[in-house]
Amino acid sequence: MTIEAFLETAWNDHANRPQEVADRLTASLHLVQAPEHIPPYVRLLTHVFGEHLGQWDRGIALLESLRRLPAFDGGPVVVGAVARGVATLRYASGDSSALESLTVEDRVSALAGAASAFTGRNAFAQALAAYSEALRLGDAGLPSGSPAIRALAVGGNNLAAALEQKKDRDRVETRGMIAAAEAGLKYWRQAGTWLEEERAEYRLTRSLLQGGEHGAAIQSSLRCIEVCERSNAPAFEQFFGHAVLALAHRNAGDIGSFEVSRQRALQLLEQVPQEERQWCESDRSELGG
């Protein structure tokens, strides 16, 4: 099996079977045969052992073992990837000194990664604090293409999505949810394609709806739709934009506009391939009818 096939399968499986994927990672170091294999391997390893399992020490040990592989050439890309992964898990485990030897850019990555790990463990106060510090450091500016930009994008999205589902969310968490969604959008615009930007707008709309900011939610959903239209997005993506626009109109009390957007969303749903419609069901059910 190639490293690419291994990672693709592992990403597909990790949400439902994280421990199994962690064990596969431990047993598959032999697949890491070139320096370019190391960063994607580190990304999955850090995510699974941190966010999903909270197995900090085991993840750190496996990351450090990468340094002994022939593929570890000592170049800045592989050295940085492993150092950020180790620092992320150390910091999330409670080691406040984990960031001391890192550059500001790498501190941003580690803090954003730790925020995602805390989020996965439902430690929201720690997640909000880590992500807020990552944003503060990132505000000074990050070089184009920096791994820290993607880390901020992923961290913001993950934190906002999780807080949206929190039933007993307090006022501080609600503000943090919206700030995380806004930052996720900001950094996906730099790190991603139109697809990530569109989905980040959808995430922001959802967070704004949860926060009761219906007017801002309407504007965000309209931007989501605009990204889809200028990118010739498939009906699957367009459905979600029109669905959340309908919900925003309904929450704002504009039933006429709600019905117009609802009908457009349902028209788009009819164009979605049957095998993809399961992912639309939750939004469709919110539309009623």
Image (cartoon, rainbow, N blue to C red):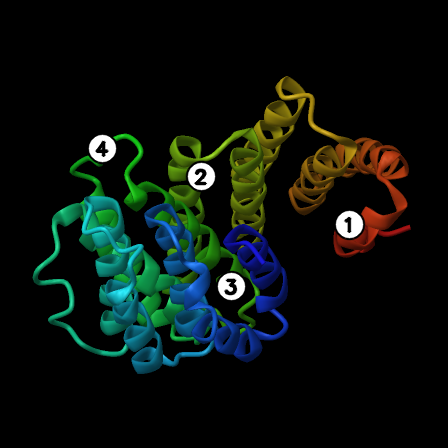
Q: Which mark is residue 12?
A: none
Work out whether residue 53 or residue 271 is closer to the camera in this orientation and state it: 53
Can you identify the residue that label 2 sits on?
185
Quarter of the image for residue 47 reads: bottom left
Which image quadrant: the N terminus?
Answer: bottom right
Q: Nearer the viewer, mark 4 or mark 1?
A: 4
Instruction: Examine the rendered structure and indicate whether residue 58 appears above or below residue 80.
Output: below
What secondary structure is marked by label 4? Answer: loop
Question: Which of disc 1 and disc 2 is earlier in sequence?
Answer: 2
Distance from disc 2 to disc 1, alpha carbons, whole Å, reads 22 Å
Can you identify the residue that label 3 sits on?
162
Distance from disc 3 to disc 2, alpha carbons, whole Å, reads 16 Å
Can you identify the residue that label 1 sits on?
280
Distance from disc 4 to disc 1, alpha carbons, whole Å, reads 37 Å
Q: Is residue 38 left or right of residue 14?
A: left
Check disc 2 and give the amino acid type: Leu
Structural crowding at the residue carrying mark 1, measured as other residues with C-alpha within 10 Å and reported as few (<14), some (14–19) or many (≥20): some
Is residue 152 visible in this depiction of the protein? Answer: no
Work out whether residue 105 or residue 270 is closer to the camera in this orientation and state it: 105
